[in-house]
Image (cartoon, grey):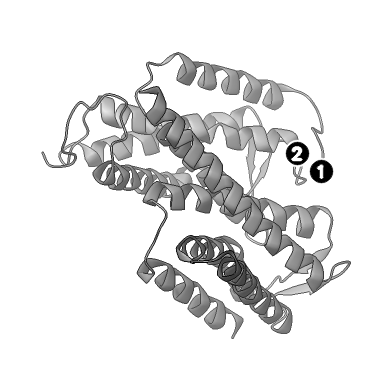
Amino acid sequence: MNIWKNFDVNEISILIMLIASYALIYFLPRKYKRDIALLFLFFGFTIGVVFDFTIGGGIIDFYTLNDSERYELFDFFYYLLFAPFSYLFVYLYDTFHISKKTFIVYIIAWALLGVGMQWVFTLINIIEFKKDYRVPYSFAIFLITQTITALYYENVASKRQILRRPKRNTRMDS
Amino acid sequence: MAFTLFFFGSWLVLTLFTIIPKKLAFTENTFVFLILLVISINWTWIIYEEFKFIESTETPMDYAAFLMFRSIIIPIVIITQLNISALARSRTLSLWTIVLSTACLLLFTFFSLHFGMIKYVNWNIAYDALYYLALHGIAYVTLKIFQTIQMNEVNDL
């Protein structure tokens, strides 16, 4: 295990994005109860870990993170970026009152955003694809992850109070 | 054979978890599951790929079985134990659920070795037993922390 191989553009970019994304979450009005906020932050982080260690390692190994095949500290920092991504996804999901009519568009928009971010990550050498894997393939993964996140959010919201100050009682009813 | 066995194992533990009466809330179960999943994935990567204490198979179907063990069977067995333990009437019964779920995970580890999914290089099954026991402890502590966060929120409002 390394802390980093070379401290250059990818490490600096990850640090900047980490600070910016977590600062954004910190300064956004608190919408969710603490445990729910923590749950969705960790939900995103776990999705990052699961997919990276499944298709980015082992015998599948479609990409290399940062500068080496070894597990680096900045790989871990990269996974931490998925946490605010997931939090903002559900935060805006609620803010925009996503319903059955807007669900598909919302998921596609976030899947495209995810693919766009992955493309940027390839430009700044955070991700290097291998074995003919291409950026657009990640669209399928983001479609799945964002759909799972949204459905899980709906499920949790239907079971208990998740907002600090409830705004509406029914979800996905419209 | 390994793929079939571990697919069946995954299906069985998921189904058992679904049908058992659950003392923990949906969000509590999810949070503990996510923590266990992240630890399980990181643990296997560090022990297998970084330290090379254990070798994993290069055969695709056996590797799929290995992924199912790492990502489904280990965390689900432990949160099932946690839910059953919460229903246990005595501490002794609760401890027996830990023994039983650890034995269950060790049985799957034995199958992993038997079918060549993994090969110990500088490791033995006692270390795995300690790891599984530690995971039970981590699951319990995680649950308590999550419940404390929930309680603090209620008290703050």
Q: Which residue lies under the disc numbered 1?
A: A1
Could you tell whether A78 is left or right of B56 in the image? left
Identified at 22% across, 34% down, the residue is: A98
Q: Position of residue A139 (x, y in %)?
A: 42, 44
Q: Position of residue B92 (x, y in %)?
A: 60, 69
Q: Residue furthest right?
A: B122
Using the image, name the chain to which the residue with label 1 belongs. Answer: A
Badge 2 and badge 1 both on one subunit? yes
Secondary structure at badge 2 equals: loop
Q: Position of residue B91 (x, y in %)?
A: 58, 64
Instruction: Report the amino acid beneath label 2.
Output: Glu
Q: Please determine whether, in this image, residue B62 is positioned above or below residue A127.
A: below
Identified at 66% across, 31% down, the residue is: A125
Could you tell whether A173 is left or right of B104 in the image? left
Q: Please determine whether, in this image, residue B79 is positioned above or below residue A150.
A: below
Secondary structure at badge 1 equals: loop
Q: Which residue lies under the disc numbered 2?
A: A72
In the picture, residue A17 is in which quadrant? top right
Q: Which numbered disc flags the more N-terminal residue, 2 or 1?
A: 1
Label 2 with label 1: CB-CB less than 8 Å: yes
